[in-house]
Amino acid sequence: MVANTPFNDVDHGRRRFVGLVTSIAAAGAASILSTKLAAAAGDDAIRTFRVNIPEEQLVDLRRRLTATRWPDRETIADQSQGAQLEKLQELVRY
């Protein structure tokens, strides 16, 4: 006698259908991705990219960056303590 568990109540037809749909979706996504990658690889033209950020958000960002409270310098010269303070300050100045 087999115990009645959730695994015994599985609708195998439904499971096969979901597997088939998943396979078709994955194949379609792979096809679209490979087409886009191939197009991108052959297209090395420089195109304009525009970003619209409200000026008040930029002013607020600059204000917050200027107000940054920096930690003390690292006690060692390598990056084992994280990002180097000097590099971060250089990035914020930029």
Image (cartoon, helix red, strand yellow):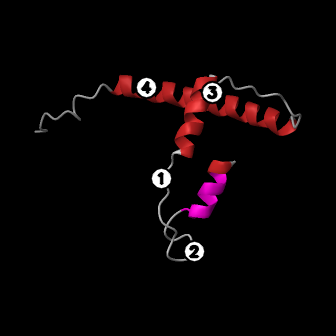
Residue that numbered label 3 is attached to: 28
Q: Is mark 2 on a helix, strand or loop?
A: loop
Q: Residue at x 44, y 23 (%)?
A: 17
Q: Which of marks 1 and 3 is in front?
A: 1
Picture disc at residue 78: 2
Mark 1 → mark 3, Cα distance in angstroms:
50 Å
Q: Which of 32 and 71 is in front in this view?
A: 71
Q: Which of marks 3 and 4 is nearer the N terminus?
A: 4
Left or right of 62 on screen, residue 33:
right
Mark 1 → mark 2, Cα distance in angstroms:
22 Å
Question: In the image, which residues are magenta?
Answer: 83-91
Q: What residue type is labelled 3?
A: Gly
Q: Nearer the viewer, mark 3 or mark 4?
A: 3
Mark 3 → mark 4, Cα distance in angstroms:
15 Å
Q: Earlier in the sequence, mark 1 or mark 3?
A: 3
Q: Residue at x 49, y 69 (%)?
A: 81
Q: Which of 84 and 22 is in front in this view?
A: 84
Residue that numbered label 4 is attached to: 18
Q: Earlier in the sequence, mark 3 or mark 2?
A: 3
Could you classify mark 3 by the number of other residues whose Cα lies within 10 Å: few (under 14), some (14-19), or many (20 or more)?
few
Q: What element carries label 1?
A: loop
Q: Is residue 87 above or below residue 61?
A: below
Q: Which of marks 2 and 4 is in front?
A: 2
Q: What residue type is labelled 4?
A: Val
Picture disc at residue 22: none
Left or right of 52 on screen, residue 79:
left
Q: Which of marks 1 and 4 is nearer the N terminus?
A: 4
Which quadrant would residue 16 be assigned to in this image?
A: top left
Q: How far from the left and from the top, in percent, is residue 70?
A: 50, 57
Q: How far from the left and from the top, in percent, is residue 37?
A: 75, 36
